Amino acid sequence: MNIFNRWLAKFLPADEYGIDDASGINKRYKRFRISLLTTLLTISIVPAFITAAIGYFQYRDLLQTTEKEQLLWNLEGAQKTMQALINELHSSIDFIIREDRCEEMLNPETLDAMLVRLKAKYSGFVDLGVIDSQGIQLTYSGPYKLKGYNYRVQEWFGEVLARHFYVSNVFLGYRNIPHFVIAVSKKLPDSDDIWVLRATINADTLQKFISTINTKASDDIFIVSRSGKLQTSSRYFGNAMEYCPVCEPSSHIHEIVKLQGGMGDVLQVSAALENTPWMLVLMKEKYIHQAAWSSFRKRLLLIFLGCSVTCLVISYSLSTMLTSLIHETDEKRQSLLTDAEHSNKLASIGRLAAGVAHEINNPLAIIDQKNGLMQDLLGLTEDFKYKDKFYTSIAGIQNSVSRCKVITHRLLGFARRMDVILEKIKLNELIQEVLNFLEKEAMYSRIRIELHFQEDLPEIYCDRGQLQQIFLNITNNAIDAIGKDGLVSITTKLQETDVVVQIKDSGPGIPPNILKHIFDPFFTTKAPGKGTGLGLSITYGLVKKLGGEITVSSEVGKGATFEIRLPVNPDKSAERDKDE
Amino acid sequence: MKSVCRLTLTNQQREIKMSEIKVLIVDDEVEFAATLAERLELRDIAAETVNNGKDALSTILIRPPDVVILDLKMPDLSGLEVLQGIKTHDPSIEVIMLTGHGSTSSGIEGMERGAFDYIMKPIDLDLLLEKINQAYEQRKNRRKQP
C-alpha cells in the first residue's frame, strides 16, 4: 500500500512552491495529464488486447483442429479406396492362378487369353508371367521375350515366396515407362512346388485411379514410396519417380506434418497402404475455413479497434477533465491563500498604523494646545510690529495640526475593531441617504447620478454607520475620479443570497498597475495633502468585516466599476469576522 | 477646516466667568494638562492639574471640583478606574472623558459608567468649553434636587 501511495504521490501534480512562472505550472499539469492518460489507456487497452489475442489464438487452434480432423477423415476414405484397388488387383491375379489352373497357365495361349481379359478390365496390364520355385520364368505373355528368364536372385522373388503377395515400387525398367509389379505365389496342391504369377502394370493405372479420388478437403493427393520416391504425380513435388523431400520421414501411422512450403503453411497427413511399400499422402495448402477465419479476424480487428478508440476517447476526455478540475481547485486555493495573505497584510499594517497614530496623537494634542495658548495670549497682547505675521503662523500651525488630526483619526479608525451592530436595513434607502450628502458636490461638478434600484430588494442585517461609510467613500471616490461632467450609476440587485451594489463612474479609468494596489493603505494618486490613501483600504476593511466582498474592475478610458457584495444572512458574516 | 478663533470673551463666557467653575484636569501628559489649564484660566475657569489617577482622587477629597476632565489612558490607575472612584465619592461631580483612541467605543463605555460626555484628542477648545458649561449646568441641577 505504501509503495502504491508513493507511486501515486509521484504521479499527482505535487505542490511545488517556488515555481511561480506559469509555464512551469502548465508543464506540471501537462505532465500529469499525460501520465494519467497513459495509465488509463494501459489499464483499459491492455486487457482488451489480451482478450483479443486469446480469442484469436483459441479460434485459430479450433479451426486447425477441425480442419485436421476433416483431412484425416478424407485420408481414411482415400486409404480405403486405394486399399480396395490393391485388393482387387490382388484377387484378379489370385483368380488366374487358382490351384486347379496351374497346368493351364503353362500354356502360352491360355496366358495370352488371360492377359487380354485382364487388359479389358484394367488397361494398365502390360504382361503376365509364370515362374517356378527356382525363379525360372516358365511362360510369358507380353511384348518382350522373357521366357526362361531367371528371377531367383532378385529380391522381390524371395519376398513373394515368403509372403505370397508382393507389390513393387514403381520403376522405369527396359521400356522407360513407369510401372510396378504385382506377384502372387501359390503352393501346388500335390507337391511342395511353388508357382509364382507375376504381372506388370503401368503406373498410369495408379495415377488414373488416384485422380478419381478428388476430395475438396485436400489440395494434393499422391502415393509415395517409403524411400521418398513419388509413385504418382504431385502438384507440389512433380511427376512420378521424382524425389519428394518432405515425405521421407513418414512412417506407417497417421501423422500430421506442418511444413514451411513456398506458399505458407501446408498441412500434410499420410497413411501406409497395407501389403504395399506405399504411403498415401494428402496435403492441404490453406485452411478450409479460410472464409470463416478471415471474417472472424476482420470482426475481431473491428471490435478491438472500436474498443481502443472508445477507450482513447474516454481516457482522453477523463484525463483532460480531471486535470482541469485539479487545476481549477489549485487555483482557487491559491487565490484563497493570496486573499488571506492580503488580509493579513492589511491587519498588520492596521496595527502598525494604530500604534503610530496613537504615539503621534499625544504630541499633536500638545502642539494643538500650545498653539491655542499662543493665540489666546496674542489676543490679550497689545498690537506690535509682527502681530499679524504671528497670527498667520499660528493659523498655519493650526491648519497642519488639523490635517494631522484627520490622518491620525482615520488611521485609528482603520485599525479599530468597532463592534458591528446589526440591524434591519433597506439598502436602497440607505444609499439615497448617503447621496443626499453628496448631491451638492455632484451638482457643482455637473455630475449626474443615475440610480437603478431593484425595488423588491430584501432587507439586510448590517451595520448602518459602517455601510454609510462604505458607500460614502466609494461614491465620493467616483465623483473625485470624474472631476467634472460625467455620470455615476448605482445599481442594486439580488444575486442568490447576496445583495450586490455596483457603483460605476464615467471617469478616466484605472490602469492595471494601480488597480493592483487600490486597496493598499496609504496608496493614493491624489496630490499630497488631498488624500490619505486610507479611504479605500478602510472601505475594504469595513466590507470584509461585514462579511462582504468588494471588487473593482476598470479599463483605462472606460471608467471604473466597484462591486460590493453583502450577505443577506448575517450569521455567516459574524462567523467570518471571528475567524479573522 | 476650522478658522482660527481669536480670544474674545462672549456673553456666555462672561456668564461662566461669573459662575466660577472649578475644573480638575487629569492627564499623564504634563505639558498637555498645563497648557489646557492655562487656556481655561485665560477664560476665567479655575483649572487645576494632576498627572495621575491617585493624585486626582486625593485632590477631589481636598478641593472638590465641579467638572473633571479625565484622560482615559494613563499608567497605574486607568481613566475608567478613576471615574469609578470619583463617582463613588461624589456622584454630582461631572466627568468629561478624554479619548486618544479615535474610537468612540471607549468614550461610550465611560458614559455608561457615569461620565457626562467624552471628547477626542486633539481637542477642540470651543467644544470643550461648551461641554464644561453643560456639565456645570447639570451639576447645579443635581445639587438642587436633593
Image (cartoon, grey):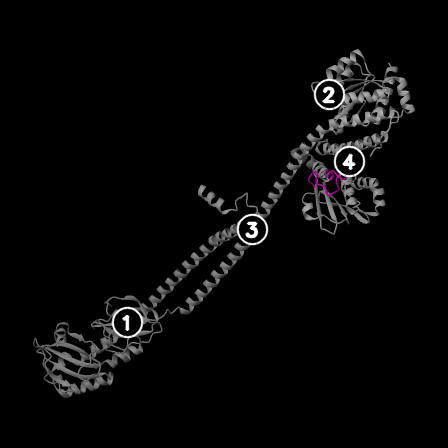
Quarter of the rendering containing residue A346: top right
Dots 1, 4 in contact, CB < 8 A: no
- Please say if A352 is above or below A447: above
Frontmost residue, A358 versus A498: A358
Q: Are callouts 2 and 1 both on one chain?
A: no
| Image quadrant assignment for residue A292 | bottom left
Element class at badge 1: strand
Q: Nearer the viewer, residue A473 or A522?
A: A522
SS for dot 2: loop
Q: Earlier in the sequence, mark 4 or mark 3?
A: 3
> Residue visible at 29% across and 66% down?
A257
Q: Chain of mark 3?
A: A
Residue furthest toward the top?
A: B62
What stretch of residues is rendered in magenta? Answer: A519-535
The CA distance from mark 3 to mark 2 is: 61 Å
Kindly identify which residue carries mark 3: A23
Q: CA distance from mark 4 to mark 2?
A: 36 Å
